[in-house]
Amino acid sequence: MNDFLNPKFVFFSPVQEIQPVEEHVDHAIIALDGRAPIGGAWSVEQLNPVIASPAIRVELWVNDIDDSTCTYGFLACSEDGRVPYARGERSVVCVDPASGVPSKWTRDFRDAHAELRKDLPAYA
């Protein structure tokens, strides 16, 4: 019902071995953006232990985006979405591959991510 006000990208990250939730979030960002996240900060709140599962459901949305930084909100949970494992934020920086310095996001990136901006606060 709130998908219009609180759009999100959902990714099922395969569990291959014991991995931190952060790896699953980065896999979701790669699936969304087509490139690995570089730089940035993490904020993770562990909610429940991860139980044996073939995949972790990662829900991503955009909390904030500026010229060179995008901050995703996320919820990592069981495949059916009923058991939350962790929630938090992951900030990534747009880095020019040639110079290694922060650069501006492309218009295409900003347009695609505008669709994932939350209009209401996320309560997981």
Image (cartoon, rainbow, N blue to C red):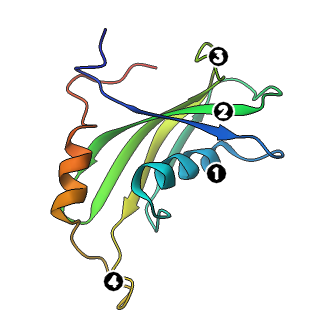
Q: Amino acid at mark 3?
A: Val
Labels 1 & 3 near each other (Cβ < 8 A): no
Task: Pick whichever of labels 1 and 4 is earlier in the sequence.
Answer: 1
Side (left or right) of 14 relative to 2 = right
Residue beneath disc 4: 101
Task: Pick whichever of labels 2 and 4 is earlier in the sequence.
Answer: 2
Could you tell me residue 1's position as x and y percent?
Answer: 31, 8
Task: Pick whichever of labels 3 and 4 is earlier in the sequence.
Answer: 3
Front residue of 104/39: it is 104
Q: Amino acid at mark 1?
A: Glu
Q: Amino acid at mark 2?
A: Ile
Secondary structure of the residue carrying numbered label 1: helix
Q: Amino acid at mark 4?
A: Val
Give the residue displayed 71% in from the left and 46% down from the top: 20
Above or below residue 12? Residue 3 is above
Give the residue displayed 24% in from the left and 20% down from the top: 4
Secondary structure of the residue carrying numbered label 2: strand
Residue beneath disc 2: 56
